Image (cartoon, rainbow, N blue to C red):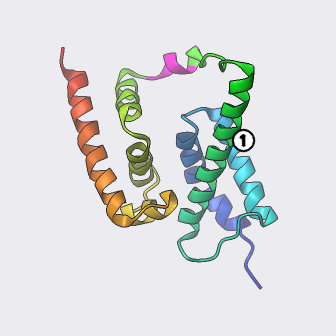
Amino acid sequence: MTQPLEPDLEALHPASFGWALASCGWDREEAEDVLQEAYVKVLDGAAVFDGRSSLKTWLFGVIRRTAAGRRRRRWARALSLGPPPPRDPESSARASETRQALTRALEALPARQRELLHLVFYQDLTVEEASRVLRISVGAARTHYHRGKERLREQLRGEDRP
C-alpha cells in the first residue's frame, strides 16, 4: 500500500508555487491554475510518482509539463482569436529597480538556462536534480548552468554601465 502524497505536497507547496510562477512567466493567476491542475493530476493518478527521483524533482517536472501544455493550448487559441491582452502594468510598476534589472537579465537568457538557474537558485535543487526536472543530461545541465550564470553576470554588469 502506498503512502498518501497530500502531506508531502503540502510541505512542498511554497517551493512548488515558486516554480509554477517561474514556469508561467511570473503570471500569478496562471501559476495558480497550473499548480491546481498539476495537483489534480497527482491526486487523481494521472501523474504517478515512481520513485526514480525525489518527490520534489518529480513534482516540479509535472508542474513544468502542465505549464507547457497550458501554454500550447493558449497559443493555439491565440492563433485563432488574435493577440493576447496586454500585461498588467500595475504589477510591473511595483517591481524595484534591482528586481527589474534581474528580471530583464533573466528574460534575456535562453529558456533552458533561465529554467535551470531558477531551479538551482530559487528552488534549491542540485544541478543533477534540475536536469531530471528538465529531462536533460547532467552534462547538458552543467553546461547550461555555467553559461547561464556567465550571461547573467555579463548582462547585470551591463545594466550598471551608463
In front of the other: 90 or 137: 137
Q: Which residue is mark 1?
A: 33
Above or below residue 56? Residue 100 is above
In front of the other: 146 or 123: 146
Q: Amino acid at mark 1?
A: Asp
Q: Percent from the top left, x then y, of residue 130?
A: 44, 59
What SS does tag 1 mark?
Answer: helix
Q: Percent from the top left, x then y, of residue 30?
A: 67, 36
What residue do we see at 56% from left, 15% from top? 89
Does residue 106 belong to the magenta stretch?
no
Residue extending farthest to the bottom is 1
Residue extending farthest to the front is 80
Above or below residue 54? Residue 24 is above
Q: Percent from the top left, x then y, of residue 2?
A: 74, 81
Question: Does residue 29 show up?
Answer: no
- What span is in magenta? 91-95
What residue do we see at 58% from left, 65% from top? 58
Above or below residue 47? Residue 2 is below
Please identify the quarter of the rendering in which residue 29 is found: top right
Please identify the quarter of the rendering in which residue 153 is found: top left
Residue extending farthest to the left is 161
Question: Does residue 131 show up?
Answer: yes
What residue do we see at 45% from left, 52% from top? 119
What residue do we see at 63% from left, 34% from top? 28
Q: Percent from the top left, x then y, of residue 66?
A: 66, 50
In front of the other: 38 or 137: 137
Query: What secondary structure is the magenta-colored segment mainly?
Result: helix
Above or below residue 26? Residue 95 is above
> Badge 1: few (under 14), some or many (20 or more) residues near its Cα, within 10 Å?
some
